[in-house]
Amino acid sequence: MSMNYDDSSSLIFINTIESSEGIQKSFKISKLQNPNRIYFDIDNAVLIGDKQQLIFGKSNIKEIRLSQFTTEPDVVRTVITFEEGFDVSKVTLFYLNGYIIVRCAVPQITNDYFNTVYNDNTENLTYSSIAVNSQAVQKVPINNLENSNISSSVMADIQQAFENSTLNNSDGKTFDSVISVDLSSNLKLRTKYHINNARTKNNGFLINGIGQITADKMFFLDSPKRAVIDLPNTYVENNLRNKEIKLCSDNSCKDTLKIGQFEYNKARVVVTSDTAEKYIPIFSADSQSLFFINSDKLKHTDLISSVSNINKAFVRKINNKTNELILSFTAPVVHSVIRTDNALNLYMFNVKSYNEQDLIKTFNNTYYKPFTLSLLPQIGVRGSLAINNTDIVKIDQSIDGKALKITIKQGISDKPEEKAVIKKNATKGKVVIDPGHGGSDYGAIREGINEKDITLDVSERVSSILKSKGYKVAMTRNDDTYVSLQDRVDFSENEAPEIFVSIHVNSAVATEPKGIETHYYHDYSKDLAKVIHSHLIKDIDTKDRGLVKSKFYVINHTTVPAILVEMGFISNEEERAELISDKRKQKTAKAIAEGIIEYCKSQSK
């Protein structure tokens, strides 16, 4: 069914479903050279989906390929290529509980006590050294290999059988620069958390999984009201993806939860509710489960199975900007992290007591001196610390659940409340239109259709409409040329427009998502986003995916109201066909132009 592997790339797991005849339990490993590799066959087996391939950037393993080698008889072949010099005699193979397990080395524990459960900046936690490809394999007849004296012609056949790849690998020797070009829906990538269950429980939503949860900062969206949290390095079972789970089966409330595979190794959890801002995420003591509940409905007895106390605290200054606090508990702790722009609140729901005087002594003369602890009736203990919105918070939990490590890297001081920063020489009625991508940057690609072509076409139509209404328009690119993100920002700053509008096409790993999103970052851009989005949704028959506050570079660094429109999904076959049609392009352009005109008129009053 799929391949997966552990963090240290020491164990490879091939997931199988047994038929009534059972599966082969023992395997013969054959060794080959030039390059250094092994292969083994799984007899009487059928591969679900196309060939699967994993490329490793930093590992003794360079590449794994799994393919339907022959039919009649059905044989699936696995080929593993190693770095030159790696001793393949160390490789062992065995079967256990539905998994064929390849042991390449003794697994290395890279973090022997703490695992990250919350991080404001999870980009550095994402596995980036892996590329994935799923293409059909050319079947090459191979002679029966019963001994180690393999002829050079047979070796050539084996090599040829696995050289038919569309991976972008320019030098043919190193895999460090390989990029992902396709992704099989049946392929499980390396993750730290595997979600396999989601249901309602105790007036909330419970997500269960295997592994180690890590969460981003929760954020909130309007129209409709939603609480959103991303889980990096997380894989979601296919049967759970985008499934709507209702909190009230009798429809007495409208609260629902959905989980999607937002990126190839990131899950997104969305709670839709009229009281979305009151929902909080709660981590189980073993970090295997995540519970979402309206804090008004929270009952202490629903969360705890054992009572814990704060035992000790330790503070360490890592450098002038970074400080660390470790809280030690007498039993595993059930907790929640609530990060706002100006505070960190840590709720410890099963903690009943702490020694206040000891903690005061520990915190004194340290960064954490303002950290306060308070008992909450029937809830537990809350720890609070005032911080800046630019500070980076990371919270780790020990494997036994009996310690939490809070690391805060100080950023710059809070900025005053944002106001529209329109330059004095800004030209009223002037608009910068930014067609996404261009030149060597194709954007999203599906079936030979490029995002960069659609964005330029629609942008030109928007420009034409605006100019016919007397508006001045400048475009960051007028043809198929590459323009860097900073150059786009610089262009806008030099033009000094009234507003900036970037036009893009969305894409996803899954083929189901469709619809329009409008992104903004600065608060002074939200009104512009609302107006243009309302015109798009009114004029185009597709799903309303709402307004999204996103830190896209071009809308973050421009100093005028700026938005980014995602006008549909190129990854959705039905919507892709519409996006390339003149009818959809013209409707989109007209809606964007009318939204711009409405906004500009409202600002001139």
Image (cartoon, rainbow, N blue to C red):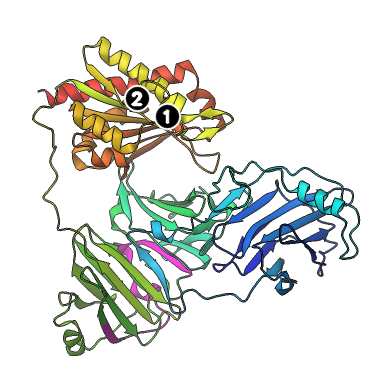
Q: Amino acid at mark 2?
A: Arg
Location of residue 378 in the rendering, given as x and y in whole percent from the top left corner: 28, 77
Magenta range? 288-314
Q: Is residue 210 magenta?
A: no
- Does the CB distance between marks 2 and 1 fall below 8 Å? yes
Location of residue 333 in the rendering, given as x and y in whole percent from the top left corner: 37, 78
Say above or below: 50 vs 333. above
> Which residue position is annotated with label 2?
477
Local crowd size for mark 1, using a 10 Å CA cut-off: few (<14), some (14–19), many (≥20): many
Local crowd size for mark 2, using a 10 Å CA cut-off: few (<14), some (14–19), many (≥20): many
Q: Amino acid at mark 1?
A: Gly
Residue 246's disc is none
- Using the image as rendered, state which of residue 198 and residue 512 is in the foreground: 512
Q: Where's the N terminus, which quadrant?
A: bottom right
Location of residue 12 in the rendering, given as x and y in whole percent from the top left corner: 65, 65
Quarter of the figure with residue 130:
bottom right
Give the mark nearest the N terminus, 2 or 1: 1
Say above or below: 53 vs 603. below
- Using the image as rendered, state which of residue 121 and residue 96 is in the foreground: 121
Q: Residue at x 60, y 46 (%)?
A: 171
**Number of numbered tags placed on the structure image:** 2
